[in-house]
Image (spheres, rainbow, N blue to C red):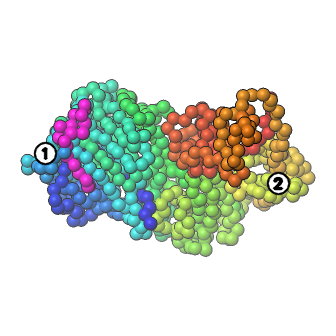
Amino acid sequence: MKKNYLLLAIVASGLFYAQSTPPTSTGQPAALKSTSGIGLHHKRIWWINWDLNNNKAAGDNLVNGATTTFVSPAGFTYKATISDVKVYTGATAASPIGTQITSGTNFVLNANVPNSWSGNNFPTAYSGFRNFTTNPSTEVADSNAVITTDNLYGSVGGGNRVTYRLTVEATDPLGVKGNATGIVLAGSESLNGTGEWYSLSAPQGRIRYIDKYIRSTASWNNYSVQLQISNAGKKVFVTNPNGGDTRGDAMLFAEGVPYVDAEVKGGGGQSIAIGFLEELDYSDAPRTYGIAYHLFENKFRGGLFPDGNKTLSTDSNVADYASPTGEIAKFFDPTLRLGATIDSEDNPLLSLPANSTNMPIPNWDDANGNDEDGLNSRTSTVNGFMRVAYVNISPLTSYMSVWIDADKNGIFDSTEKLVKTIPANKTGNAIFDLSSLGLNPGSYYTRIRYSSNPYLDPTGYASNGEVEDHLIKVDKNYYNILGTIYQDNNGVIPDGTAMYNVTVNLYDVAGNLVDTTLSNFEGQYMFTGLTGGNTKYTVEVLAPSSYQHVSSTDTTPFDGITEVSLNGQNVTGVNFGLYFDLCYKTPPVITGGLPTNHGITNLGRAGKDDGNWPMIRTGAWSALESKTKGFVINRVAANYEPPLDDGQIPAIIEPVKGMMVYDTTNHCLKIYDGVTWKCFNVQTCPPIN
């Protein structure tokens, strides 16, 4: 069984063909991350070093079938292979195919450094290459991170159209093989008019536009790049409609594919750089606890265009990306994460200081503010229970594992583990009962791992999600109020089916709002960090539309309000029951209307002499009838595009108002209201006009 893994990136605008004996890398060529330039994705892309013979010099000849292998920081082994290379002469903008040639095609593909040509747009965006796997602080001067194409030894590299296929096989840390899940292509030199181009074709899905760059950042008004989209978005052709060198390039992303077919056409030599997207989130507790790491889900949204020509704006890449209406695809946080935000680290050694054994507080590695927000300053002080915030806008069942070093021995033991199973698309708060751990007042190192991978250990690899380490404080003078919201069909005692996402408010004795929360997937809510041993509070549940209050744990079950006194201890079981008032209304009687002249039936009747069907069904364009068959609406998977009403929308390029589909990701019937997609998942009783 094959699985899909990381995202391969290829920066390309080159010409090449091959000779007979394909070389294979003799060592483990390093992959490099760029650390400078205007590019949007420095932390995400690892560029492969094509120095196959490990001699630290440029000029390695790469032929048809050439293979290189790289072991990533996550423990993935990537094997990249170039194949099916063809060269065509005579290709022009008016006649872009050309005539295939087979002679003089050797020695056209060679390893080189990224800044091999002074007019190259690429180094302005991605440069300052470093190997974060072995030497995270030293820039690699001779990176060999691109492939050049030229006319060495009488070959025909310059000026011709070249097509090729790039395939990458990935082997995960557990030894399971699969293909890369996406490929990126970007211009790495320049396009001088419509006679030069590059294109990316994918076997499935659609291609996104994810970055742009230009040689001189002071000349964005001179940017001239056009995308020509075809085959329902599976192919994007990039050219310069206005002529002139160093007027910019574009970076494209082929999503969810095991390989790509690319073509390039230049006036002379061109270049290509290949890499993959891999970001990791590492744990950062003292090293005695071991290292856990999670692979990012690298997802983009936007950057999609219908078939046709799209001349890109002259806005800078930074301005375009920041704009809500910008053309460049936006990168968004993984669909499984702890708290609201997440960031990545380049190397586990960079996320832990040398004296981390004595490190007083983890999370110091947060690069862009505090992303360790599964717990906050309030919820990290606990007494008997712990509330962890998480996001799940994924179709996957997920698992949250918590380890608290109760015996303070510097190790997360198996007996110190708590686990929750969380259904798909159920963002909220996981509530853990800590009573089994016997925690005394004091501070404890805590590790939280959240992923769709079940049975995680406190250390090692996870294919998605996030890991956070915290130093929690147990304080018996901080109290909690907990309860459960039920859909209760019999009243009296709150029970029945747990209700998700019901709003619950907490007020102090003066009537001031203290906190607001939502019931989680188990129907539970929790207010934490409350002080004052004899303080009184009021819990209020807001009934959703069409629901009414029918039960509670006090003597006033119909008001949705319960008064609570702490009395120096946690208060649990403050439960509420809500009843859904089913809608039974007599439909309006409609008379008259034109007959329905079209119908499909499997009841063996039709026409005036056979029940007058379907004409008897007035007022419709078409009638369907069956006692054993169902009507199947179009089934469409979601693609995580905004606007987000439930985390995803159907993968339809240009929806129209009133369009209906069945969303196979969220398992609901959806309608497009002209602005966003909405699930039919709330029963109501609208008035009949």
Q: Amino acid at mark 1?
A: Val
**Residue 93 within the segment the image draws in magenta:** yes
Q: What label sits on residue 488 in the rendered view? A: 2
Quarter of the figure that contains the N terminus: bottom left
Displayed quadrant of residue 396: bottom right
Instruction: Name the residue rendered at 69%, 48% in the picture.
Output: 604
Residue matched to label 1 = 156
Q: Is residue 124 left or right of residue 408?
A: left
Q: Classify 678 as above or below 479.
A: above
Q: Earlier in the sequence, mark 2 or mark 1?
A: 1
Q: Is residue 532 left or right of residue 191?
A: right
Residue 593 image position (x, y, % from top left): 74, 28
Residue 368 image position (x, y, % from top left): 47, 46
Q: Is residue 319 left or right of residue 94?
A: right
Quarter of the figure that contains the C terminus: top right
Instruction: Name the residue rendered at 82%, 54% in the picture.
Output: 488
Q: Nearer the viewer, residue 136 or 491?
A: 491
**Residue 489 within the segment the image draws in magenta:** no
Magenta segment range?
82-99
Q: Secondary structure at mark 1?
A: loop
Residue 26 image position (x, y, % from top left): 21, 65
Displayed quadrant of residue 178: bottom left
Instruction: Name the residue rendered at 43%, 63% in the picture.
Output: 2
Mark 1 surroundings: few (<14), some (14-19) or many (≥20) residues within 10 A: many
Displayed quadrant of residue 222: top left
Q: Is residue 38 left or right of residue 87?
A: right
Residue that sits furthest to the front in the current view: 609
Instruction: Name the residue rendered at 42%, 40% in the picture.
Output: 232
Q: Are marks 2 and 1 in contact (CB under 8 Å)?
A: no
Mark 2 surroundings: few (<14), some (14-19) or many (≥20) residues within 10 A: many
Res. 628 visible in picture: yes
